[in-house]
Image (cartoon, rainbow, N blue to C red):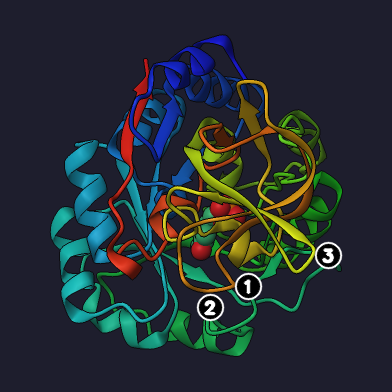
Amino acid sequence: MEERVLREISRLNTFPAYVYDLPGLSEHAARIRADFPHEIFYAAKANPDPEILLALRPHVDGFEVASGGELDHVHRTVPGARLAFGGPGKTDEELALAVRLGVERVHVESVRELPRLSGADVLLRANLPFGVEGAALAMSGPFGMDEPELRRCLSLLPPDVRFRGLHAHLASGLDVEDLLKIHCQVLEWAAEFAPEEVNLGGGMAVDYGDPLWRFDWKAYAEGIPDVPFRLRIEPGRAMTAHHGWYVTDVLDVKQTRGETYAILRGGTHHLRTPVTKGHDQPFTVLGDGGRSGTATLVGQLCTPKDVFASRVPVRNLAPGSVVAFDMAGAYAWNISHHDFLMHPKPAFHYVT
Ligand SMILES: *Cc1c(COP(=O)(O)O)cnc(C)c1O
């Protein structure tokens, strides 16, 4: 953890809190920008916090939004930014908003969207049978279209809807080698359509078992073949995951039925990531004194699912200890069920 983050955490006097490291995020995004020569749109759904969007803005080409709510929010927060709007099940109101705001690209997921996209520039989203074992989240499901349906879109394209190219976001949580396997297949497939551009989606890995591990953007960029069309990616998690912490204090440490539990203020209604991903959220205990050994870190919710980390080695854990959960900068606060049990919400702090 950077000194500036530790300093901010040591100044906190109410818990729980989220701490975001904006200089760290800017540096990280600038490095990605330097290593990756194609267009980068940040997938806002990973973390749409306004300060995060503003910190990323100088380092990305635009933002990808996946709902009318995100579209409205990002448009207001970073006025003038280039926007792409995707997602299944777009409503009349959402499509009208996209047209009215003149978003740069609409990612079309169904032939039914076309008649409502007068004047729009579109990418057709493909659901392709390419994959690799080990993808954390294969995007199989109602996303995009099979090739025949995609060709039907092309034949039914209204005259004032401009086909710009193709979109494919096929899996999440992949390292360089696996991502390239998929992306090379996508690019080869896409060439037949003579697109102006192809959006390869997001899905770059992070490692919740190793907070210091980083996706190798340079190796990824070097592995992408030369193609005669513009390329764009839209990463979310690997941009912001490492620059947020959920920080709280220990209310109680107790043993029951042979297990040691540390009960923390707050819970997975603030940081749902470990439950949804099925991992132990990495953490640091600040301060000294207290017990060492093995413990399960839980929150205040009355459900056995409220677990941050299960039977993990701990040091210096006691009531009053401060615990900072790492990698809480993406799919953390904004995917959590905040109102369950009506506990107070965390405060948000920004290292600047
Ligand atoms: C969620 C999503 C992304 C971002 O995925 P990450 O795994 O966070 O990089 C990009 N594109 C689409 C269409 C998505 O649904």
Q: Which residue is mark 3?
A: 134
Label 3 crowd (10 A; few <14 / some 14-19 / many >=20)? few
Establish if 151 lies above or below 349. Answer: below
Mark 3 belongs to which amino acid?
A: Gly
- Marks 1,2: beta carbons within 8 A: yes
Q: Tell me which label, 2 or 3, sits earlier in the chain.
A: 3
Q: Position of residue 352 (x, y in %)?
A: 37, 15
Task: Determine whether the residue tagged by mark 3 lies in a helix, strand or loop.
Answer: loop
Q: Position of residue 342 (x, y in %)?
A: 28, 64
Q: Which residue is mark 2?
A: 143
Residue at 68% x, 30% y is 290
- Please state which of the two labelled residues, at mark 2 or mark 3, is closer to the viewer: 3
Left or right of 59 on screen, residue 224:
right
Label 1 crowd (10 A; few <14 / some 14-19 / many >=20)? some
Left or right of 50 on screen, residue 225:
right
Mark 1 belongs to which amino acid?
A: Met
